[in-house]
Amino acid sequence: MEQEADLTPRADCNLCPHQDDLLAQGRCQPGDCCVSADSGRQIDRFFKTNPALAPDYMRDGFWERRAIAARYLPTNRLADMLSDPDEAVRRVLAYRIPLEWLPKLARDPDREVRITVADRLPVEQLEILADDPDYLVRVYVAKRMPPGRLFRLAADGDNQVRRAVVERIPTVSLGLFARDADPEIRRIAARRMDAEDLYLLATDQDWLVRYEVALRAPPELLERLLHDADEEVRQTAQARREDLILGDMTDGS
């Protein structure tokens, strides 16, 4: 049976500056632990074995070599790579740099970098990303920003951002979503809204929103929902009205 060819990337040790020291000491190995090969696996093994050499490759011409070196750099050298031209390198930095440096990457052209910033940035600084052009960055902001400061995202143009907001904003402010264009957002508002505010959604065009209202509506609002256009809403309102009456009778006995 013919043996399969070995396709493992191998660099020429004769062209490597480490052939006389690391190779002889067993701290690198062709095809397995090698900084010169165009192989991320081999490069990572090299720096894992020789982390002190990572700074020597901060300006290397191969983006993947720089990105892997960035994983092993001392923290005080990371700032020197913040302007690296490759987004893969800056993504590594976004995970590693101290929190106080993160605003320097808040306007990075790569959205994955900015998402990492949004995920790590102290909550009191998240508003610097509230107007980010990418909706997914704003979603991360909406999921982490203190609930009391979510108002500026309540009218965001993206549904996913507004959904993240409506799930966390203080209940007293849920009326802001009573006329939202997305029915799912109005349903979430109906599930969270204070009972006395549910009248804002009692005539909603989406029957599922009115159904959510019927599940929690106070007695006076239930009377209106008994005449709803949708049968399931009417039945839900009737069943809940009967439960409330029964509860009152039990309490009074």
Image: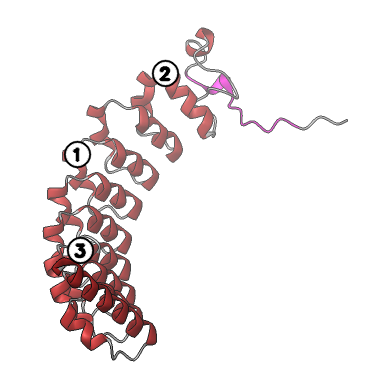
Q: Main secondary structure of the magenta part?
A: loop
Q: Residue furthest front?
A: 253
Residue 204, percent across and down?
A: 27, 84
Residue 36 locus on image (x, y percent): 51, 27
**Front-most of residues 185 and 69:** 185
Residue type, mark 2 in image = Asn
Q: Magenta includes 158?
A: no
The segment highlighted magenta reads 5-17
Earlier along the polypeptide chain: callout 1 or callout 3? 1
Q: CA–CA distance between discs 2 and 3?
A: 42 Å
Is 248 placed left or right of 160 in the picture? left
Residue nearest the viewer, comparing 251 with 147: 251
Task: Compare residues 21 and 233 and report the one nearer the observer.
Answer: 233
Q: Which disc is residue 50 wearing? A: 2
Q: Residue at x 28, y 69 (%)?
A: 188
The first of marks 2 and 3 along the sequence is 2
Q: Could you tell me which secondary element the residue under label 2 belongs to?
A: loop
Query: Rounded to the nearest whole Å, what is the CA distance between mark 1 and mark 3?
Result: 20 Å
Which scheme is used to colour this image of the protein?
A: secondary structure
* Residue 62 appears in the rendering: no
Q: Classify the position of the C terminus by image quarter.
A: bottom left
C-alpha distance separating marks 1 and 2:
27 Å
Residue 81 lies in quadrant = top left
Q: Secondary structure at mark 1?
A: helix
Query: Residue under circle 1?
Result: 99
Nearest the camera: 92 or 19? 92
Give the residue type at disc 1: Leu
Residue to which mark 3 is pinned: 131
**Quadrant of residue 200 in the image?**
bottom left
Left or right of 219 in this view: 212: right
